[in-house]
Every structure is written in structure tokens, then in C-alpha cells.
Image (cartoon, coloured by chain):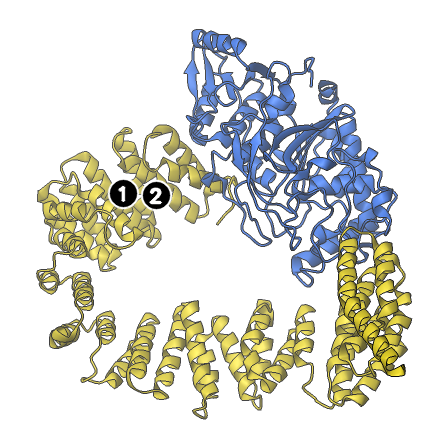
Chain colours: A yellow, B blue
Amino acid sequence: MRPPVRSALAALVLLSGALAAPAAAQGVGQGYELERLGRYPQAVDLYRTILRTDSTNLAALLGLERVLPQLGRLEELVPLVNRAVAATGERDPQYLGLELRTYVALSMNDSVASLAHRWTARVPGDETPWREWAIATLDQQDVVGARHILLEGRKAVGNPRAFAIELAEIAGSTGDWAVAAADWADAVTTDQGQIPNAVVQLESAPENAHRTVTDALTRAGQSISARRLGANLLLDWGQGEQGWTVLAGTITDSSRETVMSLWSFAERGGQIGTPAALGARGHALARFADFTTGALAQQARTDAARALLAAGDKEGAHQIVARIGAGEVTPGLIDVLIADGELDEAARRLQGMADHLAADDASRIRLELARAWTARGELARAEQALGTDSSIEAVAVRGWIALYQGDLGRARAGFREAGPYTGDRADATRRTEMLALITDVDSAAGPALGGALLQLARGDSADAVTSLRSAAGQTAAKAPRDGILVLAGRVAAALDTAHRALAIDLFSRVVADSAGAGAAPAAAELEWARLLEREGTPDRAVAHLEHLILTYPASAVVPEARRMLDRLKGAVPRS
Amino acid sequence: MNRRGFVARLGRAAVGARVALLTPLRLLRTPSLEGSLLVPMDDTQGDHLKAYGLTYRAIQAGGKVEWLLNYRGGSFLLPDVDAIRRDAGLAGVTVTPVDEGAVSAARGEIAAGNMDSVQLERAPKVAVYVPPFEAPWDDAVTMALQYAGISFDKIWDPEVLNGGLKAYDWLHLHHEDFTGQYSKFYLLYQGAPWLAEMVHRNTAVARDFGFANVPALKKAVARGIRDYVSGGGFLFAMCTATETIDLALAAHDVDIAASFADGTPVDPEADSKLDWSQAFAFSGGRLEQSPAIASFSDIDGHQVNVPGHRQPLGAFQIFGFSAKVDPVPTMLVQNHRQVIPDFYGLTTSFLRDHLKPADIVLADEQGAPWVKYIHGDLGKGTWTFFGGHDPEDPQHQVGDPPTDLSLHPHSPGYRLILNNVLFPAAKKREIKT
């Protein structure tokens, strides 16, 4: 009979065990709910009940860890967690961690230290106890203590670079940036995958600590990963050229990590977008291209040349373009040539590969070429580049060409037809402004005005001011004449002191002579106010804005004037 | 309600930093006997928010000003003088000159409908409770006052504790944590310079005034504000200030602050020890005990920072009151919109279950267990609570730039704020609320 009895008992035990698990899970769920309701004593009772049947129930132990401190009774957890640790053979890091945190919270420092050392002795090299101890100490706002523990742990586990990330974050949070940089250098030396994380953490260093950080990372003898980290930070902090120099010094092999360091550095430079960062991007991409082949290499070199051009490094761009080679013409290469001002060469290469280009690419490049010829003042070649293109983009470009040629009628027609349908919002606004300016200008003044506007488009602002005034003198009707004078004043206002005085003279003449008629006086007064604000006399600017708003209440510039007035009076935040 | 009595006692001494936004108007010309300026507040208005500033300055200048409740969106009637016309022109506020005949016709319409006319006789002196350091979030009321061009003083704990509130008709509170737990951002934003500054400044004031810790200081400040209202002041609070000032008042003898704020854990029996008789608006709230969760209690219906409990935003509807019978709530709800998109705050809304029976609900979300905008009396004064942080930035995050109100000149949510500024200007009369 005995075997059947044993079987029955075994079955009973299994059954009760099977029932106990969901019951415990259900109990823990009830405990959570009691916690949420703030019924802590009841939650404690429930967790204790669970532990009576299962002394190692981790969820219940963790529940007590949350709740008992709220009741000021955390010491009750000690025997419970001691029992669970013993029952799991002092090996399970979850129970050991809980025991350690409990000791820390109860300031049982001797017990904590003893446990951490026993843990390390039992599992050599395991960083967990020291990390848990440090985190628990940090939870109690003891930053210095946490740092001390991690340094002690570093010795205990026998790894001089252990806990580098934690130590670096602690140092950063306390503003000790030299130490943070040194610790991050250790961290990325151990695991170069940490470089992006390190960059994010160190980026928040204040400006006066930048030099300390980058010096620590890029000094002689520092690891390649640390120097790459330093290169990225230099790039972030506006020193693209130095960043590239540091990075270039780390390119000593062709490993995947090395190639990717170039790529990510170039990407970062593109995101920053300043000339210095774009220059660094260009160099990094050019070097990246050396490690790749085929289309990827050509694309990288094309992008590198674009970046260098954008950074103002024409010579560097030339060198890269030369490496792309005559037989490797791509749309990107022609873009680079156009951006570099090599318009004849660009036109020649375009001609040579016309049959191989997609229609969209060909059309886009022709428009770019036409714009470039226009900007250079070679209007006939610009027309020629457009060919028979009847797209709306080409219509807009032809409008500008006609304007600069002095054919105001054709310019008006082109701008009207293009409307807002091509280019971005700024393009559309420029066309609208120009249309407003030339709408009532008589054709006799067209060549003078066109020539002046071309000078302006080509960046010859000082001469453009003179030419615009001259064109105004040739304009018979008062309203368009005032409009041209306002434009001349606006250009002059952005130049030197003498021109600013001239601008004020022009604005005051327009305001005084107009007797409130037309759009020009309001525009003149707004520009006048802007100039006065730039010159540091906001009170005078306010007076002009108020005069503008009250005198020309129906003017289109009143909302803009009112907004500026609000800003100057502090009614809206400065953005 | 003895509000006028309070106003008459006002001293002139300025407390804190005076923020003069616009030179007060001077009515250079005697108002024309025939003419007035109607400031319509319906959809024809060019800038609803600045219209309040125009009206405020007209009252300040001593002009006869009327608030035409429920008439064309809650319009104003101002004297037709050059200074006001000029001010309106500069501000972009739409004004319509009306002769005596038109005014009479309007009065006839007002007499016949659910409308009324309230005379605004004295520009209330406004204080905004603002800490003297920069927090990484905006303050809707400060922005509304600045945009409208209504002058105000900035005050903080020292001014309240030194009795400085007596100098003001109107006090505004916004994203303030009167439980002294730094909006419970202490653990989340540990190491952030702004938080370090906040802790440092608050701790210094607590020490200077002899309080053991910041929660104790804030309880005393809350009591000072309660005394101010009880004595006849007008309190307007938004966002966290609504909930936490009531918690601070109810917790006068209970520790409700986490250990990071005062060195000791929250009293585990705190919920049962709270004395809600001291609170303005709420009763029966239960505290959020976790120091890591940026929520204070279950008074807030939306619980924006509580994982798993956050409620989605809907729209709230403004109640319509009888203008002739209930002019106070009618003033507080003047608007050109009746349904307004909701917006989050650390305290977004107020659960109906936790309102006191005497609270007047001014706006709620239909079908939801919470309300948005409430009002009530305390002693000789009144309080108004408006949930949420920024009516035009429904999800305002820590670190977000301030809202530019010139992009929202018709904001119905901001109008509710500005109604509160003008409401203390109303001439006292027997009011049944």
C-alpha cells in the first residue's frame, strides 16, 4: 500500500505547487494594486503571506523593498532577504542585489562591504555587486560615496577600466569634466561602440570646459577610440578643421571601424552644416572614398567636393573633382562643376552625356546652369542653357533673365505665370516682391533698373545702391520711384556707416514726400525701424513703428510692424 | 463678498519687481457726450487678447468702461477719446465708434436677452507669483499679461511671508508646487542646472525664514495666500498650483513630501490625516506616494505623467450662466467659443468626485469624470482654478520654448485667463451666485 500512498502525496504536492504559482502571481497583482492605492500596510501583509509559502518569491520581496521604506520598516526585510539568499545558494545575483540594496538603504555599511567582497570572491570579475551598491548609493544622493565604491570595485574586480561609464556619468553630473573625459576615454577604449553615447554625454559640458575635455581625449598616447571621440567633439564645438586633423591621425588601417568612423564623422559634419563642419565632412568623405570602390566611391567624392565647395574650399574641391576622372561623369559631378563656377566645363560635360541622362536630371541641370549663367550676368548663355524647356521652373528663370535685361514687360509676364508654383516659399516671395516693385515702372527705366538689380543679384551692393537711385531718377511715376528708393535704402542699410546714413536719408525722403499714399512709405518706415533697432536705438524704432501703424493702418506691412513692436516692448518672447 | 472694501484699503507700495508694459493711457480729451467705442469680442475682433489690455488701460486712465456680458462675445464699451483710438490702432484691436443711438439700441438688446452690462471701475493691481529664477517652462498668465500689455508685479515667497499680498487685488499662481517637491521632477531631472538652482533658491528662503525645510516653507506660503483670499483677495491659479496649494493647505500637520524634499518619507497614513476643510476647492484626494512619479494626487483626472493612467485630451465646454443673476461666473466665461480643445498640464483637470459641494463648475468635458475650470468663494474673496499649463501648447514639455501669443491673438483659452484679470475691476453690487 505504501507506494500508492507516496504517489498520492507526490501528486498532492505537485498539485498544491501548481496551484500555488498562480495564487502567488495573483497575490502579487493584488499587492501592486494595494500599493497604487497607497494601502501599504495591507500590501506588506500580503507580500509576507506569499513569502510564507515561497520564501524566494522575488516579486514579493521586491514589493516589500518598495513598500517597507514608505512605512519606515525596511529593517523587516533583512531576515526575509537573508533567508532567500541562503535558499538560493548565495549565487543568484537578483537576490544578492536585493540584499545589498537593503543593506545600503539601512546604512549597514559593514554588511554591504562584506557582501560585495564575498560576492566578488565567489564570482571573480563580476561587477554586479559594486554597480548595485553604487546605484543604491546614488539613489540616496551620495555621489561622492558612489564614486568611491566604483573605484574600490575597480580594484576588487582587477580591471583598471571597469565602471568607466558609470564613473564618467557621475563625473559629468557633478561638472568634473576633466575626470569625465578621462573616464569616457577608458570606456570607449574598452568598447568603441560607446563613442556615440560618450559624445552625447560630453556634449553637455559648458563652453569653458571644452578645451579641458578635448585636450584630455586627444593628447599623445591616448587610444585611437579616445582620439576619435575627441575629434567628434571638436567638430561639434565648431572646430571642424582640428577635428579632422585629429581624426585623420587615427586612420591607420582599413578596418570596418576605421571606415565607419570616417562615415559617421562626415554625417555629423553634414548635420552641423557650418562651413567648418562641412569642410571636415568633405575631407572625411574624400578619405572614406579611398576605402571604397565603384559607384559608392564616386558618390562619396562627389559629396565631398560639394561639401568642400560649400565650405569655401575650392581648391580642395578641385582636387577631388580631378580624381573623379573624365570618363566618370555623373549628374553629381556636373552639379559640383556648376557650384564651382566651372560653367563651360559643366556645359561641355552635360552636352557629352545628354543621351545618358534621365530627363529629370537633364532638366534640373540645365536650370541650374541657367541660374549660374544668370548670376554671372551672362544672360544670353543663360537663355541658351534653358533651350526649349517650357516647364514652370524655366518660365521663372526666364522672368529673372528678362528683368536683368531690362525687359520689364516680359519679366512681369514670367513672374505672373510662375506665381507660387515653383521653387520654395522664399523663391515665390522674391518673385512677388519683384513683381510689386516693377509693376508700375515705365519701360523706359527698364534697362537701368534691370542693370541695377543684376548688380544686386551679383553681390555688388554698393554700386547697386547708386544704380537703383539712378533708375529711380528715370522713373516718372511717383509710387514705383519710391519703391525703388526703398529698395536702395534697404540695401544701403546693410552696408557701412556712410551707407546707413544714406539709407536713413532715402527712407525719410520717401516718408516725407509721400503724404501717406502708396505702399512705399510704410515699407520705408518699417525698414527705418529695423535699421534703428540694429543700431541699438529701439525707442526710436518704436516711434517709427507706431507712426507706421497709425498712419498706414491698411498697409500690408502693418502685421509685421505690429509684431516687431510687440517684440521690442517685450510683449512676446524673443525667438 | 466685500471686494470693493478690500480694494479701497489698497496701499500703493509696490512689492517686488514692477513690470510696466505700456504707459498708462491719459485721456487727453473729455469723452464726447455722444460717442463711445465698442470693442466687439465676437469673430470680428482683430485681437481678442489685446482687447483686454486696451480695456484695462482705459480703466486705469479713469474712463467709464462697461463690460457687455454675452453681448457679441462679451464686448467692452469704452469712451471715444483719441488716446484709446490710438492705443487700439497700435494694438490691432478692432473698435467701432458708436453714437448714443447705437448704444441705446445695444442696451435694449441686452435688457431683452441673457446679457448684462457691468461697470468696470478700477484697474485691479495684479501680482504674479513667480520665482526669481528661470524655470524651463512657460507661464501662460505672465505671457497673457505681457501680450495684452497689462502691468503686473512679480512676487515670491518672501513677499507673501512679509505680508506683501495686501497691496494687490489679484494674485496669479501657475506651475508652482506648494508641496515643496519641485514639481516632483527631483529624481527625473537630477543634475539639471535649473533644478539645482531651484533647490538652492528655495532652500535658502526656507533657511532665511526659519523653516526646517522647503515643504514647511511652502505650507506657510499657501496659508498666507489663503489668508489673502479670505481677506478679500482674488486668486487665479493654473496647472500644478491648483492641486498643490490645496494639498499644502490640507496637509498643515501632515508630512506629504517625499524624503528628497524634507529628509523623511511621506507619512504612510497621510491620506487619512489631510484636513480638507482648509482647502479651497477639493476634498478627499489621495496622494501619489511614489517620489519618482511626477503626479501629486488623484485630484487630477488626466495624470499626464503616470504610466498607464494618462488620459487622452478631449475638448471642454464652457457653461452658460444667467448674466443678470450670476454675473460673476458669467464674466469668467466670456468667450467667442464655447468648446475649446483641452491641453495638458502637470495638473490638467479636476475629478468631479473631489470637488467641494460649493464649487461652481465653469467648464467641463461632457461625459468625462473631470472638470476643467472652477470657481468659488472663500471668506471675503474668491478663487478660480483652471487646469492645464498652456492653452495654445497642449503638450508643453520641460524645455519647450514659450508660446508666442502674437500667433494666437484669438486664443479662447487665453481669453479665460484674461477674463479673470478684469473681473476684479467690476463694480460691486448685490450678486447672487
Quadrant holding the N terminus of chain B: top right
Circle 1: element type: helix
Q: Is residue A574 above or below residue B225?
A: below
Amino acid carrying mark 2 in the image = Glu
Mark 2 sits on what residue? A527
> Going by the image, does A429 lie left or right of B108?
left
> Going by the image, does A301 lie left or right of B261?
left
User: Is residue A373 visible to us here?
Assistant: yes
> Going by the image, does A360 lie left or right of B329?
left
Quick check: marks 1 and 2 in contact, CB under 8 Å?
yes
Q: Quadrant for residue B95, please give it.
A: top left
Along the viewing direction, whichever of B429 and B377 lies nearer the viewer: B377
Q: Is residue A57 above or below residue B225?
A: below
Which residue corresponds to the image point at 58% horizontal and 91% vertical from the top-left? A221
Mark 1 sits on what residue? A486
Amino acid carrying mark 1 in the image = Val
Q: Residue furthest front?
A: A1
